[in-house]
Image (cartoon, helix red, strand yellow):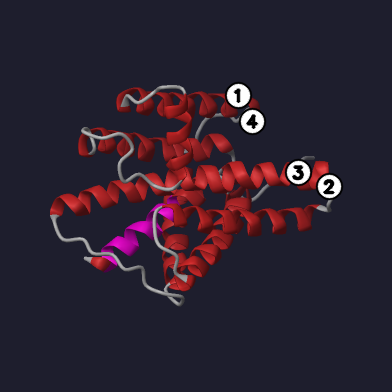
Amino acid sequence: MPKKVSPLRQYLHSSQTIHYSLILTLPALAIYELGVLILFRDSFFELRNTGEVLLRSLFESIGLRNPLAVSLILLAIFLIVMVRGYKIEKKQGIKADYIIYMLLESMFWGFLLFMALQMFTRLPLQVYSFEDKISNINLAIGAGIFEELIFRLVIIGAMMVIFTRGLNLVHHWSIILAILLSAIVFAAFHLLMEPYSFPVFMQRVVGGILLGSLFYQRGYGVSAYTHIIYNILILAESW
């Protein structure tokens, strides 16, 4: 007789998978890309987040500078990976209540992350006009999506392969090193867009460690929305 799995364990396992993560983040990605096309229609990647600096270089290197084309490509990639992940993981249907639980869970983690990082320093933000507020909310959504995609999903995943298969490290040391190094890279990458400040740098390192740990335990979708909630709380405090 198969062992019965509790509803909580079912939720924790299912919500960690890639197709649930992308189902959760796809609407946010669509809102963000639509916002970019409207708010920054006269420029290419202006004011975008650090996660998209790499994407900017990639698209520009192949001569692709049309914002609409970039947005459609990103949405298409998310859809393809989401459908592919659903087929590979062979899940029977999608439970809509899991999406709601993931959103509520992300709000909880986002609030805790905000409270924890406030112990380091308060980010100096000055937002005056209504247009600036809308633009910053849109950028906060994009930062959560793309920074978690690059610095957690891609970098931690790549480092885990290097440490476990290339260097034959035991699993727990591999994940610790991967999370720590990805957090340092995450903090360092922000220096491309802001002046160096030790308290802010350490805040980003600790934030990267916390988000990396959350990503490892709860998956990309929850870590991305946690990052979004944290960014919005930072903006709300400055208003």
Category of crowding for the residue at label 2, using alpha-carbon neighbours closer than 10 angstroms: few (below 14), some (14–19), many (at least 20): few
- Check the image and name the residue furthest to the right: 168
Image position of 15 with respect to 194: above or below: above
Q: CA distance from mark 4 to mark 1?
A: 6 Å
Q: Which residue is disc 3 drawn over?
A: 162
Given residues 15 and 53, the one toward you in this image is 53
2 or 3: tag closer to the N-terminus: 3
Instruction: Verify CB contact (< 8 Å) between mark 2 and mark 3.
Output: yes
Q: Is residue 99 in view from this perspective?
A: no
Instruction: Give coordinates of residue 105: x percent, y percent.
Output: 47, 56
Q: Please, what is the three-letter code of the amino acid marked with disc 3?
A: Ile
Q: Please, what is the three-letter code of the amino acid marked with disc 4?
A: Glu
3 or 4: tag closer to the N-terminus: 4
Q: Please, what is the three-letter code of the amino acid marked with disc 2?
A: Leu
Q: Which residue is disc 1 drawn over?
A: 87
3 or 1: tag closer to the N-terminus: 1
Instruction: Give coordinates of residue 229: x percent, y percent.
Output: 38, 56
Q: Which residue is disc 4 drawn over?
A: 89
Residue 49 painted magenta: no
